[in-house]
Image: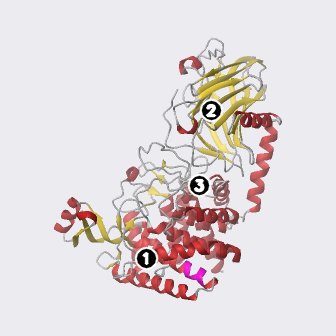
Amino acid sequence: MSNKKPFLVDAIIGNSKFLASLGRTGKMYRLWWPNIDLPQHVDAIRTGIQREKSSVSWFDEETGGWSHEAAYVSKTNIFRVSARSGQDPVQVESLHFAVPGEDLIVREYTFTNVGDQPASFSFIIHSSFLVSENRLYNTTMFNEANDSLVHFRHKYYFALSSANVCTKYQAGLAWDDVQNGDLRGNNIDMKPDGALKWSIDELAAGASVTIPVYITAGHDEDSALQNMRTAKSKASSEWAAETTAYWNEYLAAAAPCPVDDAEIADLYDRSLLMFKLMSDEQTGSIIAAPEFDEHFVRCGGYSFCWGRDAAFITTALDKAGLGTLSDSFYAWTLTAQSPDGSWQQRHYHDGSLAPSWGLQIDEGSSILWGMWQHYLEKKDSAFAAQVWPAVEKGANFLLGWLDAENGLPKPSIDLWEEREASHTYSSAAVYGGLTAAASFAELAGRYDLAGQWTAAAERIAAAITELCWNEEGGSFYRGVNLTVNAGKFEQAIASGSTGRIVEGNKGYKKHVLDHDPVLDISLLGIAVPFAAVPADHDYMRRTADAVEAALTVPAVGGIKRYEDDIYIGGNPWILTTLWLAHYRIQTGCIDDAKRLLKWAIDHRTETGLLPEQVDKMTGETAWVVPLTWSHAMFILTVFMLAEAEAASK
């Protein structure tokens, strides 16, 4: 059986080694181990109950009369689902969580008979695996000694069992069979799915019974089964208590929410809890989001580490007192740097290059900037010494990427990964990266390099105000030297734009427009966070006002990325809206910032996670849940507001 996976999910659980995504019904759609970006191993794991001589009623569906309430247990990454049906007296309460420090996921199901007569039924779990993201050579077997299904392919083994001994089982079966609850006891099959059944006889009216389901992992059968024996050595309630204590202690060790507001504090806690799940325990990399479009049907994938996203994220982590995660990330960046000193678009957890559209000069620049922000938190000389060789290589790469004629960085791909130009945001990021590198150089006693990099940064800042300002449009250009296709070039020239056709490698022609006048939220990055131009500069004020006027979405509000955005329909984003809030705080417009922050909070999901986008017509979640960068911008907004209000007293 192969379900069509949803793009949007409602919850994630994990322990920085396991990561799983679930719907609001508790249905598991994806499971990653032993790293949080790949490989992914699950097709779907389904749960249902069966009455005698009836087909299975899948209580993890919104059909069949089932309704659900879903929420995280407060101050934890434990997901709770309540399932009820008007057609069945049995209600189901379930908890879903990964145990910290263990290769173990617990899914605890409590069945309560709310009727007035005893109830007999069976609980069935159907597990369909695609181990290591591959449909080939999966094997499912039943291990009698451990009362466990085992799914495996190559070096990835997953055991599934319960503390309650199952009544029936089957390894390898047709979906039609399991819907009838007809488990035939097959012990092994080279197929990816299997099922277990537990019978509950004569559950008294008002009584409850709990059946915990454990998923364990290992690189061989013995390891997976040993982890299963460990799982069964404690009651699921003990695992839940230990996991609750872990997450409570994790939050208690972080910085408290700096704003006295219950709604903000709740999302603050949820953000900090989510950050831990997005940070890979073994490598320190931080992913943008759990993957949801693995076949790249509508996007290029999200379960990678972008240096730019991570620079914002680690700055938020540091503010929130989670600097050890930042330590791990910046140690990881040393493994991801290319030999030439650059950091490419995005990477896998092990630092190897992920699928790419080409160099984005803002990625490595943001890493250098983020390293300095991290250093400023504790002034740790050991950290400065650790990253210095990478800083020197990275800054020299940036230096070599500058155009000798205009002082700006040469064209690269923009932060939205859609076009090639000398983007104004990217130029500001390079300014920030070189300025940060110069500060590290001073710490290292390399005043020659500090002077060289500072001078280059100052030339970039001057060029931004001189060459990237669009007086007619009343804002900065999004970029200069924009590469377009021949048709768009001819159309633009006919409309009065200026440009040129240049001959590139092997005689290929490139059509280049002198300016890109499109208003884009990233223009705020010139001032916040990179400070290439002061936030209160007239050019920045006019740009911010033009951006807000052009990019505010009618009806639902929020800020979209740029004027002619069509990605997933051209919706407002959480992070773009909060980016404008950052700028408004910097220029003293606190009430405006609070309004933008409130919009972001109001558009979190039912389970308290921040998406990437909000539908421009309905205001509902539109894409990617959760987006780590969205949560980072929220955390940064909260701290910026607190600092601004403290300064005004």
Mark 2 secondary-structure assignment: strand
* Residue 439: in magenta span: yes
Q: Inspect the image, locate mark 3, and give the three-letter code of the amino acid beneath it.
A: Asp
Residue wearing tag 1: 400
Residue wearing tag 2: 152
- Tag shown at residue 175: none
The location of residue 303, given as percent across then percent down, is 53, 51
- Which of 50/594 is in front? 50
Give the magenta-colored segment's residue range.
436-441
Q: Is residue 21 above or below residue 596?
A: above
Q: Is residue 149 above or below residue 106?
A: above
Instruction: Mark yes or no: residue 634 visible.
Output: no
- Which image quarter: residue 513? bottom left
- Tag shown at residue 350: 3
Locate the C terminus by quadrant: bottom right
Q: Is residue 410 left or right of residue 308?
A: left
